[in-house]
């Protein structure tokens, strides 16, 4: 029988309803059981009839009971089929989780690459993934945010354009035109929430499951992990001092992912002859080139390099990201490409995620329109130039460059200190961590390659810390 607990702060009808549902789902009230009339049950429980009527109405609306004017209220078969055939243990256990070994493996690899498992006692972190941020950025970003927040009309809060916020795409178009010599219309630009989503959308829109994709080896792990998770066959392509070895691209490739301006991991710039070879092969073999220009804006001598897209826009998808240019936290990137390809990617976006959050787009558009972005970029280039020089100088003076090969191309936010393939890279990495220095092993960027060494980022480390960290590394490694 139902009971009321006067010490329970919940409404009486809710207490009784939970007890009734428990009785039905555990089989205490079996299917077809006739429940007492509301007036009779109210007297038995000691509550008003209206309270019992609320309970009966809730049971009926949730499908636990059926009612009939002649036969009264009875427990329905629903309760038996969905609950009473088992026990409370079955109900509480919930649905069984599918086994996803590919997902688990990819996430483990991603964490290993990012060194997420090592958080202890880090004094100097040569992280190659994150940019420099300062109070100036925070001040002007806050100003932009507050201004657009106060001026945004109600229409801004509706469903947005799947391509991305139009004024922001106009600002990106302007930046590409004047800074990178990339000439496109705004319907050739789609905004995304980062490089991984860009790659994922490209895979869904332009590839079929099981098709072959060629990627750099060593290269950007998140790229080939994302493509592999989407069911693509990954073909690793070696990288040498001239960039991707184009002759080694798999003949059945439908897409080639490449970082020509500053190779992810090794850091080299793709030579002009390799670029032309790749562009010619893409036309001949009808495959897509995905050009990830993740930090090519930071070149310390001369202007940023010309892009593959500017030379061959019909076969190339150009990926740019504000993660390195501004901050990873704003989660805004862009894909630039042929109009029809972008339209197809947009259709996938409409089906899967509709559009990006509006406030970040409004803020970034304002940040760019009012000149804060270019001032921020100029300030960062000055900081990075000093840190680039400090790291190069420290590695040479410490003697590390005599024991290991140093790649310090005048572009990007990291350098490569390469060891012989027989070197125990992992042991050295953990010895450095024990000394308070986090370094990032080259092997975590590799698929089949046996190359060893460390990818050393300098964007987040000031000059004094760079010098101290490199000299401490030298004491440990030499």
Image (cartoon, grey):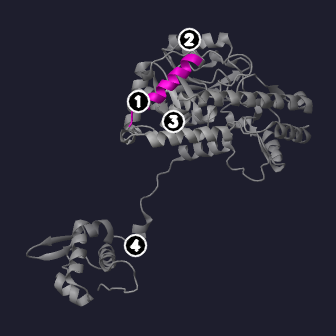
Marks 4 and 3 sit apart, C-alpha to C-alpha, by 41 Å
Marks 4 and 3 in Cβ contact (< 8 Å): no
- The residue carrying mark 1 is 346
Q: Nearer the viewer, residue 176 or 79?
A: 176
Q: Earlier in the sequence, mark 2 or mark 1?
A: 2
Quarter of the N terminus within the rendering: bottom left
Q: Is residue 171 magenta?
A: yes
Marks 2 and 4 sit apart, C-alpha to C-alpha, by 66 Å
- How would you rate the neighbour count of disc 1 (Cα within 10 Å): few for under 14, some for 14-19, many for 20 or more? many
- Does residue 210 appear in the picture of this structure? no
Q: Position of residue 301 (x, y in %)?
A: 74, 18
Q: Position of residue 308 (x, y in %)?
A: 58, 16
In-image side of 327 versus 254 (left or right)? right
Q: What is the quadrant of residue 77 in the picture? A: bottom left
Residue at left offset 82%, top offset 34%: 422
Marks 4 and 1 sit apart, C-alpha to C-alpha, by 46 Å
Marks 3 and 1 sit apart, C-alpha to C-alpha, by 12 Å
Q: Earlier in the sequence, mark 4 or mark 3?
A: 4
Marks 2 and 1 sit apart, C-alpha to C-alpha, by 24 Å
Q: Position of residue 298 (x, y in %)?
A: 68, 25
- The residue carrying mark 3 is 197
- How would you rate the neighbour count of disc 2 (Cα within 10 Å): few for under 14, some for 14-19, many for 20 or more? some
Residue at left offset 29%, top offset 78%: 13
- Does residue 93 appear in the picture of this structure? yes
Quarter of the C terminus within the rendering: top right
Q: Is residue 21 magenta?
A: no
Instruction: Point out the stretch of residues depicted in magenta.
Output: 160-178
In-image side of 390 versus 179 (left or right)? right
**Quick check: 53 above or below 282?**
below
Marks 2 and 3 sit apart, C-alpha to C-alpha, by 25 Å
- The residue carrying mark 2 is 311
């Amino acid at each position: 029988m139902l009971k009321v607990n006067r010490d329970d702060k919940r409404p009486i009808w809710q207490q009784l309803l939970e007890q009734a549902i428990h009785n039905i789902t555990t089989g205490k009230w079996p299917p077809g059981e006739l429940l007492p009339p509301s007036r009779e049950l109210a007297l038995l429980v000691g509550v008003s009839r209206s309270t019992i009527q609320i309970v009966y109405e809730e049971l009926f609306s949730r499908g636990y009971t059926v009612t009939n004017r002649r036969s009264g209220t009875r427990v329905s078969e629903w309760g038996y089929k969905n609950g009473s055939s088992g026990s409370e243990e079955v109900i509480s256990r919930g649905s069984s989780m599918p086994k996803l070994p590919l997902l688990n493996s990819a996430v483990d690899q991603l964490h290993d690459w990012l060194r997420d498992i090592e958080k202890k006692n880090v004094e100097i972190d040569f992280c190659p993934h994150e940019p420099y941020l300062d109070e100036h950025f925070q001040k002007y970003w806050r100003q932009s945010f507050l201004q657009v927040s106060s001026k945004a009309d109600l229409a801004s809060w509706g469903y947005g354009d799947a391509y991305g916020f139009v004024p922001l795409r106009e600002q990106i178009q302007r930046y590409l035109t004047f800074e990178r010599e990339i000439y496109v219309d705004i319907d050739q630009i789609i905004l995304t929430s980062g490089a991984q989503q860009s790659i994922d959308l490209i895979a869904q829109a332009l590839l079929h499951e099981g098709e072959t994709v060629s990627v750099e080896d060593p290269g950007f792990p998140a790229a080939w992990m994302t493509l592999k998770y989407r069911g693509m066959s990954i073909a690793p392509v070696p990288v040498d001092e001239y960039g991707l070895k184009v002759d080694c691209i798999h003949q059945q490739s439908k897409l080639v992912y490449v970082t020509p301006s500053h190779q992810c991991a090794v850091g080299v710039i793709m030579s002009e002859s390799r670029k032309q070879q790749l562009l010619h092969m893409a036309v001949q073999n009808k495959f897509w080139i995905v050009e990830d220009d993740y930090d090519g804006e930071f070149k310390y001598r001369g202007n940023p390099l010309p892009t593959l897209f500017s030379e061959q826009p019909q076969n190339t998808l150009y990926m740019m990201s504000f993660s390195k240019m501004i901050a990873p936290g704003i989660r805004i990137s862009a894909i630039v490409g042929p109009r029809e390809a972008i339209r197809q990617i947009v259709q996938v976006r409409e089906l899967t995620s509709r559009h990006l959050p509006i406030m970040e787009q409004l803020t970034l558009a304002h940040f760019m329109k009012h000149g804060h972005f270019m001032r921020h970029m100029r300030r960062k280039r000055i900081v990075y130039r000093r840190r680039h020089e400090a790291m190069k100088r420290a590695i040479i003076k410490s003697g590390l460059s005599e024991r290991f090969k140093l790649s310090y191309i005048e572009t990007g936010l990291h350098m490569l200190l390469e060891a012989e393939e027989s070197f125990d890279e992992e042991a050295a990495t953990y010895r450095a961590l024990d000394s308070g220095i986090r370094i990032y092993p080259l092997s975590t960027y590799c698929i089949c390659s046996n190359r060893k060494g460390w990818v050393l980022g300098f964007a987040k480390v000031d000059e004094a810390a760079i010098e101290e960290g490199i000299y401490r590394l030298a004491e440990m490694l030499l």
